[in-house]
Image (cartoon, rainbow, N blue to C red):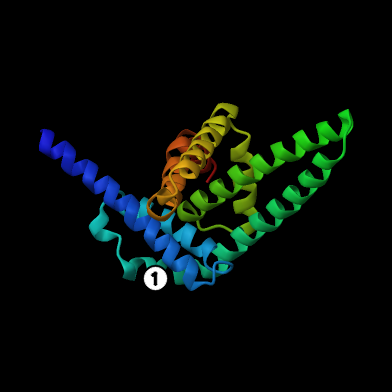
Amino acid sequence: MASSGVQRLFYVIWTIIKLNLFFLLFSLMGGLVLGIGPAFQTMNDLLTEQGMNYQEITFKRFLTGWKSNFKRGNLHFGLFAVLTLVLVYNLYLAAQIQGLLWLIIAVLLFFVLLLVTVLFLYITLYETSYEISNVNLLKLAFISVFLNFGVFLKVLFGVISILAVTWYFKGLFLFATFALLIIWSGYATKSNRQLVDQKLAVNG
């Protein structure tokens, strides 16, 4: 039993490492700007399809998924990146000005930035599950963000924790960080996504 547990742990760790390395490789293949979106989407697709079966997560499968996700993956990530840049820039400007009003504006901008981050994660997760238009995908993700505030906080807690640990252990950036982000996102939002799936099944 002990050896089986150790073996299972090895499978999980090696799957995380493989996913993360493939993500970085294919992000670079797209020159980062055109690589991150489809690579992040493909990472979730393979994780959903194959689970923690590291033997089925191969370069060939990742390449095939990366190609098929190239257009929509870049569209989704591009939207997220533009919104993030705009919010960060305005947050920076608001932080430079003293006064209660500007402090309130800065807090609101920071909260919206968190919302956009969780929104992107939902978009990535739903893209794997449903074949729907980008507009409907965005609507579904937006609704899901506000379904349960506890789930929202749970997602953020995990994301911030992973990034914080990565800050202190830089090697995780190469071997685990991005895979852990998508794994945690799937785990933390599972109840919300199941609820959405049930609602769609009833109304579908």
The residue shown at (65%, 57%) is 81
The residue shown at (53%, 33%) is 157
The residue shown at (64%, 43%) is 142
Give residue 178's position: percent from left, percent from top.
Answer: 45, 51
Give residue 20's position: percent from left, percent from top.
Answer: 39, 56
Left or right position of 166 against 76: left
Q: Which of 39 and 91 is in front in this view?
A: 91
Quadrant housing the N terminus:
top left
Q: In this view, does 63 lie above or below 199?
A: below
Q: Give SS at disc 1.
A: helix
**Label 1: how many Cα within 10 Å (few below 14, some 14–19, many 20+):** some
Left or right position of 163 against 109: left
Type of residue at label 1? Leu
Give residue 169's position: percent from left, percent from top.
Answer: 43, 44
| Residue corresponding to mark 1 | 63
Count of numbered circles in the view: 1
Q: In this view, does 123 lie above or below 60?
A: above
Give residue 88's position: percent from left, percent from top.
Answer: 72, 48
Q: Is residue 63 above or below residue 200?
A: below
Q: Which of 144 and 172 is in front in this view?
A: 172
Q: Which of 40 and 169 is in front in this view?
A: 169
